[in-house]
Image (cartoon, rainbow, N blue to C red):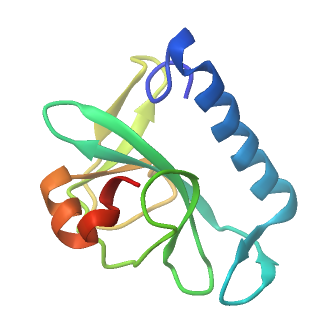
Amino acid sequence: MNTVCLAGAHSDIARQEALSAVDDVFKQGLIVSDHDKRIPISQFVILMYQNKSLSFRGIYGISPLSEDYIRIYGRLPKILPRDIPIDSYLKYSSSSRSFTVIPTKTITNTTDAIGIDPAKAKKYFGNASDK
């Protein structure tokens, strides 16, 4: 978060909000409106738009109940279904301070982020693609 996604002084507030949101979910679980109870999140992923470069769009937790992506922080829709069109699966390299594509077709324990083409996102999410 500090070196790639929300790097720089201009992102201080957003970075603190994102880290606080993730910390809250770790401690308390996540409220899902359909269930009105807190559920644990099995894994977190960072959602990036993927053009010529990566652009941070949010942090999502993967629900162990439905395997849907549930927004923890960001501006895209609250719940993204598991069949969302993912273009790439990414792993963060702390040595190079960058994301690299990993050769997989699904979320694994080593997946840190997912990349989505903005045009596909707009087509898939409609007007909610960047709210």
**Count of numbered badges drawn on the protein:** 0
Q: Can residue 12 be seen in this view?
A: yes
Q: Which residue is drawn at 41% across and 64% down?
A: 107
The x, y position of residue 64, in whole percent, is 62, 79
Q: Which residue is drawn at 48% across and 48% down?
A: 58
Task: Give the vertical position of 23 relative to 109 (above or below).
Answer: above
Q: In this view, does 59 lie to the left or right of 13?
A: left
The x, y position of residue 70, in whole percent, is 55, 68
- The foreground one among 103 and 70 is 70
- The foreground one among 44 and 32 is 32
Q: In which quarter of the image is residue 52?
A: top left
Q: Residue at x 41, y 55 (%)?
A: 131
Task: Give the vertical position of 120 relative to 46 (above or below).
Answer: below
Q: Is residue 117 visible?
A: no
Q: Is residue 64 left or right of residue 117?
A: right
Q: Quadrant of residue 98?
A: top left
